[in-house]
Amino acid sequence: QVQLVESGGGLVQAGGSLRLSCATSGRTFVIYAMGWFRQAPGKEREFVASIRWSGGSTDHADSVNGRFIISKNNAKNTVYLQMNSLKPEDTAVYYCAAQGASARWNYWGQGTQVTVSS
């Protein structure tokens, strides 16, 4: 099993920044990629960004491209999401996820709330 624990959420004004962290533990050797997803009230969970565990290639959703940056520290088994120029529509619960060799997002954290006030 892989355990994921998010931190760093909170309340911020529009235009501000936050950095989310996702600490991994357990069988981390099975991880192929890490990702961030978010779910706003009344909406479906959506992809935000992902990063390959080996190599570090990244992908960002169009809605956050240029504002959010995903990164990782393999030595610390931690993935980050730097969120800049936050907008009220970024308000959501943000989830960290891990993808195994099956290419499925099999492991999920408990989520952390991000609220952006206008």
Image (cartoon, helix red, strand yellow):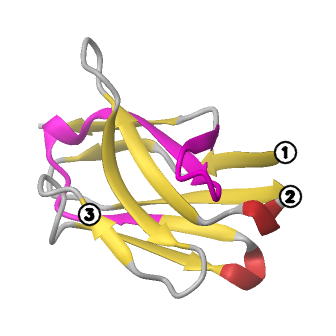
Residue holding disc 1: 1
Figure quadrant of residue 18: bottom left
Q: Which residue is mark 2?
A: 27
- Percent position of residue 35, x then y: 47, 56
N-term mark: 2 or 1? 1
Q: Is residue 39 left or right of residue 84?
A: right
Image vertical order of residue 73 relative to residue 100, above or below: below
Could you tell whether 102 is left or right of 70 in the image?
right
Side (left or right) of 6 relative to 30: left
The quarter of the picture where residue 91 lies is top left
Q: Nearer the viewer, mark 3 or mark 1?
A: 1
Look at mark 3 in the image and give the residue it sits on.
60
Foreground: disc 3 or disc 2: 2
Q: Residue at x 71, y 48 (%)?
A: 4
CB under 8 Å between discs 3 and 1? no
Q: Amino acid at mark 2?
A: Arg
- Give, as a single range, the part of the protein colored magenta: 81-107
Classify the position of the C terminus by image quarter.
top left
